[in-house]
Image (tube, helix red, strand yellow):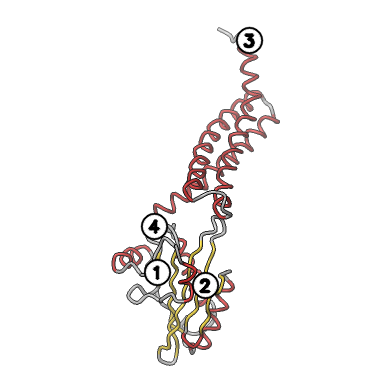
Amino acid sequence: MSATPEGGRRSARLGRILPGLALLVAGLAATSVLVAGPGYRFGGWGLGPAFTLLRWGAQLGAVAVAVSVVALIASVARRSRRHLGLAALALVVALAAFAIPWRLQAQARRAPPIHDITTDPDDPPAFVAVLARRLGARNPVEYGGPAVAVQQRAAYPDLVPIELAAPPERVFRMVEAGARGLGWEIVAAVPEEGRLEATATTPWFGFKDDVVVRIRAQGAGSRVDVRSLSRIGGGDLGVNAARVRAFLERLRASGVPGA
C-alpha cells in the first residue's frame, strides 16, 4: 500500500523540523557543558551544580546525537542539502558536548582516588608559605602515608626524583624558570633552603593546586623532589601527576648531565 498524501506531508514536515530540533538540543547540551566550569570558577554556583550541568550536558548530548542521526537520514532521503548541513552541524556539536563529560569520567576511572602526588612518598617536601592560602581547604597538607604511596607508585611509577650534576644554586634557577614557564604563580622562592612553592590554577574550573619543589645537595650535584596537592577533591583525574611529570620533563630538557 502506498503512502497517503497526508502521510507524505507529515514526513516532509518532520524532515524539515528534525535538523533544527537536533541543533537546538545540541546547542543546549554544549552550553550546559561549557558554562559548568566558568560558572564555578567565577562564583556563579558551587561544585555540585557545576557537576550537575556536566551531567545534563552529557545526557542532552546523547539525545541530540540520536536526533541528529535521524535528521541526517531524513535529509539524505529528501535530498535536502540545507537540512543535511544543519543535521551534520548538530551531530558535531552533540558529539562534542557528550564527549567532554565522558572523557572526564573516563579520566576519573583510570586515575587512583588520590590528590597528593610527590616524587618522594617516604619524605614528601613540606609546604610552608602556601599554608595561609590553604585556610579552609578541604584537603589537609599532611601526606596520607603508605596507603597513598602504594596507590601512587602503582599508577605513576615514573614519578621519581631527578638527580642533576649541578650545584643547588644553579638548579634552583632552573627550577624557578621551569615553574614560571608552566604558568605557576610563585608564592615563595627560598634558594638558601632549596625550596620553591607555587600555586597552579586549572584552566577550565579554576581549581587551585599547590606545588612545592625541594632541592638538596647530593655529592657534587643536586636532587630535586616535587609535590603537587589539590585543595579540594578526593581524586584529581591525574592532574597532579601530569603537572609533576611536565615539570620533571622541563628539567630533563635542561641539558644538565644526569637530567
> Relative to 180, does residue 42 appear above or below in the rendering?
above
Depicted 128 relative to depicted 111: above or below:
below
Q: Amino acid at mark 2?
A: Ala
- Find residue 234 and name its label: 4
In three-dimensional space, the C-alpha distance between marks 2 and 1, rounded to whole angstroms, equals 14 Å
Residue annotated with mark 3: 6
Amino acid at dot 1: Val
Q: Give the structural element (helix, strand or loop) at label 3.
A: helix
Cα distance between the residues tagged 1 and 4: 13 Å
Looking at marks 4 and 2 on the same chain, the residue that comes earlier in the sequence is marked by 2
Of mark 3 and mark 2, the one earlier in the sequence is 3
Q: Residues within 10 Å of mark 4 (few under 14, many from 20)?
A: some
Mark 3 crowd level (few <14, some 14–19, many ≥20, 10 Å Cα): few
User: Considering depth in this image, is 195 or 166 the residue closer to the camera?
Assistant: 195
**Mark 3 or mark 2, whichever is nearer to me:** 2
Q: Which residue is mark 2?
A: 198
Classed neighbour count for the residue bearing mark 2: other residues with Cα under 10 Å, few (<14), some (14–19), many (≥20) = many
- Measured from the top left, where is residue 258 in percent x and y? 46, 83
Numbered disc in front, either 3 or 4: 4
Rendered position, 251 above or below 32: below
In front of the other: label 1 or label 4?
1
| Label 3, label 4: how far apart the Cα atoms are | 59 Å
Specify the label residue 141 is tagged with: 1
